[in-house]
Amino acid sequence: MRHKSPPSSIDLMAANDLVEEPGKRYDRAMTGEPETAVSGLTADPAPPIMPAGGVRIPDTTARHAEFRIGKVFSKSFIVYTQNFLPFVFISAVILMPTLIFAVLLKEKILSGFAENSVNIMVLGIEYAELILGDLIAAALAFGTYQYLCGRTVSFGTIVRRGLPMVFPVIGISLITYILAMIGFVLLVVPGLIITTIYMVAVPAATVERQGILKSLARSSYLTRGFRWPVFGAIFLFSVIDGIISNGSVAIGGVFIDMAGGAGLLTEISGVGMLVGYFIKAAIWAFYGVLITVIYHELRIAKEGGDAEQIAAVFD
């Protein structure tokens, strides 16, 4: 019998390079490096990025700064509070379909439908809200970056710059959430990994004006090496979101219990619906600011530069 020797260190390195080959193909496509039989196994070029306008932004694998969760939340809170009214207003407008659906349920306008049909509608509007949340993030990315570099921006400008990204953002959201759902069904951890990898695809698409697949690849590259802190930031946001949402529901329940009559109960429930809607809009607005700041901090950590240089892509 022929004796098979154990794999050498060179064999293991080659196998590892084969696993990483798809990402390297993307890197070579972005840099214009020709494909060779050797490059896929041995080369590991740093991927420069070609944003709109064809200006190459050099990149290295070395970190230029630390990515810190505290710094991300501090910057996000400052941007959010200083732009609270316009950002929440934009968020509320984009979330309007969810309010309309809630009113239809409350007024029993959908009572003619079968119960299963209504349940499917409810599930559909919940998933639609996730996509609307990404649209909010895309709309607020421009305003967030302008504020980070000390510029003022009007409400109309934010809307005008965000509208062209509607369809790419919807595509990114659908791909990300479908992959994440598959990951959660198989085993929760893959879903969390996918969510983290593509967390900044929406601001990447908005800032760099890239297509759907290139934005997903860009997010994968930016989060590489920082996925634990990125996951930590999103997990912390989820905890805060849960506390605020559950707290508002509990407070609303107390007021409903205190209602003395049917008329007053109806009035309180109507007011509670509006209050809950604006709380949801405020939370989604903060989420939009947060993932944009995460994207900004990842670019600085991996590529250097500052907010002024990155925001220049909008000019």
Image (tube, helix red, strand yellow):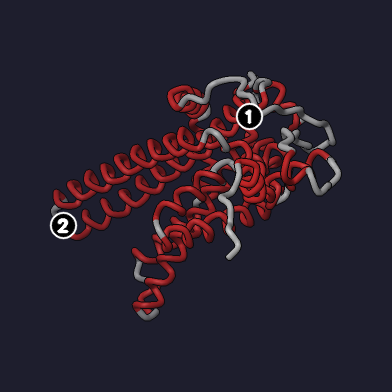
Task: Inspect the image, locate mark 2, and give the three-letter code of the amino acid beneath it.
Answer: Gly
The relative height of residue 32 versus residue 294 in the rendered view (above or below) is below
Residue drawn at x 26%, y 51% as measured from the top left: 268
As rendered, which of 297 and 262 lies closer to the eye?
A: 297
Q: Which residue in the rendered view is the most extreme toward the front?
A: 1
Could you tell me if residue 219 is visible in this image?
no
Residue 227: x, y in percent?
50, 37
As rendered, which of 281 and 67 lies closer to the eye?
A: 67
Residue 35: x, y in percent?
83, 47
As rendered, which of 2 and 163 lies closer to the eye?
A: 2
User: Residue beneath label 2, please?
Assistant: 261
Residue drawn at x 38%, y 42% as measured from the top left: 238
Could you tell me if residue 291 is visible in this image?
yes
Residue 135: x, y in percent?
58, 48
Point out which mark residue 10 bears. Answer: none
The relative height of residue 124 versus residue 130 in the rendered view (above or below) is below
Quarter of the image where one finds residue 10: top right
Find numbered disc 1 in the image and state the secondary structure of the residue it sits on: helix
Quarter of the image where one finds residue 248: top left
Residue drawn at x 26%, y 57% as measured from the top left: 266
Task: Inspect the image, locate mark 1, and give the three-letter code of the amino acid beneath it.
Answer: Arg
Give the mark nearer the N terminus: 2 vs 1. 2
Point out which mark residue 299 bears. Answer: 1
Q: Is residue 190 left or right of residue 265?
A: right
Find numbered disc 2 in the image and state the secondary structure of the residue it sits on: loop
Graded by Cα atoms within 10 Å as few (under 14), some (14 to 19) or many (20 or more), the crowding at tag 2 reads few
Graded by Cα atoms within 10 Å as few (under 14), some (14 to 19) or many (20 or more), the crowding at tag 1 reads many
